[in-house]
Amino acid sequence: MKIKGKEYRTIWHEGKTVRIIDQTKLPHQFIIKELNTVKDAINAIKIMEVRGAPLIGGTAAYGIVLAVNENNSFEFIKKSAEELIKSRPTAINLKWAVNRMMKKLQGINSDEILDVSLNEAKEICDEDEKFCENIGINGLKIIEEIYSKKKDIVNILTHCNAGWLATINWGTATSPIYHAHKKGIPVHVWVDETRPRNQGANLTSYELNEEEVPNTIIADNTGGILMQRGEVDICIVGTDRTLSNGDVCNKIGTYLKALAAHDNNVPFYVALPSSTIDWDIKDAKDIPIEERNSEELSHVEGIDENNKIKKVLIYPAKSKAMNLAFDVTPAKYVTGLITERGISEASSEGLKKLFK
Ligand code: MRU
């Protein structure tokens, strides 16, 4: 998708390095960063220079390529894989991508291992782009149906950033929106600010602006009243891990939006590539929920009058704060899962029909 009219993907390989868009600096500064070692990749995931489940997976895949480039001994690659998996716990795409890379590298000799790893990382990223495009084509049908009845602007609420910046391209939740916009359907997006890191305000609104999709940032607690007033036609969110029974783990606050949507008969859809499905964990209580540094709550970042990025304390210095990064929305509140293979009921039966 575009930034200042130029097409980008969120991650790419150039020479011996991997390039990313540093998302900690957006929307104020657009900086392309080089990752040269597997440690760089681990750090980029940890400090969220890259974030969003599919992009974390893509970065981890390239992290393995960087590891192979540094030292292609089995011990080093295995240790790097383990460290990559630990870098963020909740998004399943990370483990999925590392395991896929490691499986591909099994038994490959040292002359070929770099090329094989590079091809597989590219394949993981190309596949994600294709899957997200298909999510858009499938989700477009839902927006078209709403528009055909309403014959007026379709208002879509989204949470956090499940946009192209969270994937390789297109996004998950935003892909149906971009497809609808490109087809000329009038859409407007309510963008949850998404405290504490403000991925909605800083990233979703930014990328929608760059694609000229009308959008309005709202405080996280505003969705409820908008739904009561009939100003939300549909919610579409992303996910970091969806269980095979349809329970959806996503950015903290998603559950409350789903409850409000349920109470107001607003359809609540979750968009995801199959790499985000956890086929192993059966009970949502077993999903590792990341708890991040409380400084993300107690401090906010913005630009000052000299255009410098500045961080300030907004809480009483003595107060404690707790920063759980994700929650789980039970399947019963999810109208449907928009995947690359079609739209499924949020249930084991629904998912089994699409993914045998
Ligand atoms: O903590 P983040 O910014 O990585 O959280 C991202 C989300 O919760 C997204 O909704 C999710 O990764 C969906 S991926 C398109």
Image (cartoon, rainbow, N blue to C red):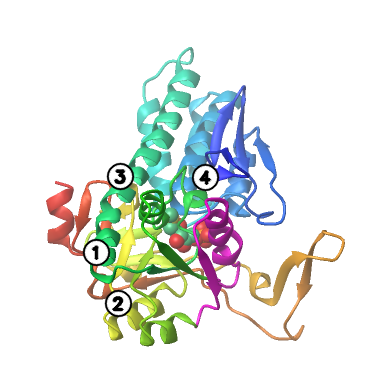
Q: Residue furthest right?
A: 306
Name the front one of labels 2 and 1. 1
Q: For mark 1, what is the residue? A: 148
Q: Are marks 2 and 3 in contact (CB under 8 Å)?
A: no
Q: Is residue 180 above or below residue 58?
A: below
Distance, label 2 to label 1, CA atoms, is 17 Å
Q: Are marks 4 and 1 in contact (CB under 8 Å)?
A: no
Which residue sits at x=48%, y=46%? Answer: 55
- Could you say which disc has been placed on residue 84 in the image? 4
Q: For mark 2, what is the residue? A: 266
Instruction: Look at the numbered disc 2 and give the secondary structure of its residue.
Output: loop
Say which of 327 and 229 sits in front.
Answer: 229
Q: For mark 3, what is the residue? A: 134
* Disc 4 residue type (three-letter): Leu
Say which of 158 and 185 sits in front.
Answer: 185
Name the front one of labels 2 and 4. 2
Distance, label 2 to label 3, CA atoms, is 24 Å
